[in-house]
């Protein structure tokens, strides 16, 4: 995790509840549903790549998830409560071999149909399906 994110987490997470209360009108996910969602996706698909946005930051980060992190963490040191939305793109760029970065990066594809099937198995979610990605919302932004 880069120093920018670490700095944001250290400072903004202290105001997390007030940020959520001020900016969002509804919450769609709790820690248990997050864990069930990630466990279902990784058990079925092995790993999934997501883009995510935190409630107190406008930068979109990407991450490859292959298992559920220890509660209450979404991705250590980010808690589930800090995530505004996640997005499953149909393709993403990642390292060919993380142990040999000289090998470079390549484009990987994800099966959005299978991801959608797993989402439906876990429960109902607030999602947008763009064809090239599926965005799953943790919060409803106030109008």
Image (cartoon, rainbow, N blue to C red):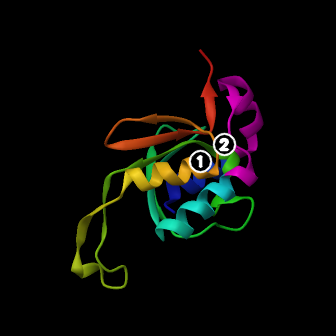
Instruction: Give neighbour class at mark 2: few <14, some 14-19, many 20+ (Cα, 10 Å).
Output: some
Question: Height in image: 130 above or below 141?
Answer: below
Check residue 61 in the rendering and tell me which mark sits there, or answer none: none
Measured from the top left, where is residue 109 in percent x and y?
30, 60
Question: Height in image: 138 above or below 43?
Answer: above
Q: Main secondary structure of the magenta part?
A: helix
Going by the image, does 11 lie left or right of 113? Answer: right
Instruction: Give neighbour class at mark 1: few <14, some 14-19, many 20+ (Cα, 10 Å).
Output: some
Going by the image, does 92 lie left or right of 45? Answer: left
Q: Residue at x 31, y 43 (%)?
A: 132
Measured from the top left, where is residue 137 in percent x and y?
57, 37
Going by the image, does 111 lie left or right of 31? Answer: left
Measured from the top left, where is residue 20 in percent x and y?
70, 32
Tell whether position 30 is magenta.
yes
Question: Quadrant location of residue 141?
Answer: top right
Measured from the top left, where is residue 117 in percent x and y?
49, 51
Q: Quick check: marks 2 and 1 in contact, CB under 8 Å? A: yes
Question: Height in image: 36 above or below 57?
Answer: below
Q: Pointer 1: what residue?
A: 8
Q: Residue at x 74, y 59 (%)?
A: 72
Tell whether position 2 is magenta.
no
State the extent of the magenta-drawn residues as a range.
13-33
Is residue 109 in view? yes
Q: Nearer the viewer, residue 97 or 17?
A: 97
Is residue 79 in view? no
Q: Residue furthest top?
A: 143
Mark 2 to mark 1: distance in Å? Answer: 5 Å
Callout 1: SS: helix
Q: Pointer 2: what residue?
A: 12
Callout 2: SS: helix
Q: Nearer the viewer, residue 50 or 15?
A: 50
């Amino acid at each position: 995790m880069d120093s920018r994110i670490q700095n944001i987490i250290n400072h903004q997470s202290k105001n997390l509840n007030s940020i959520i209360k001020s900016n969002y009108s509804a919450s769609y996910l709790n820690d248990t549903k997050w864990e069930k969602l990630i466990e279902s996706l990784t058990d079925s698909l092995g790993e999934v790549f997501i883009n995510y946005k935190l409630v107190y930051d406008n930068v979109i980060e990407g991450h490859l998830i292959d298992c559920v992190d220890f509660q209450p963490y979404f991705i250590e040191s980010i808690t589930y409560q800090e995530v505004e939305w996640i997005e499953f793109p149909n393709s993403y760029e990642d390292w060919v071999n993380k142990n040999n970065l000289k090998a470079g990066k390549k484009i990987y594809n994800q099966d959005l149909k299978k991801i959608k099937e797993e989402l439906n198995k876990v429960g109902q979610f607030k999602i947008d399906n763009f064809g090239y990605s599926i965005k799953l919302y943790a919060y409803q932004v106030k109008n």
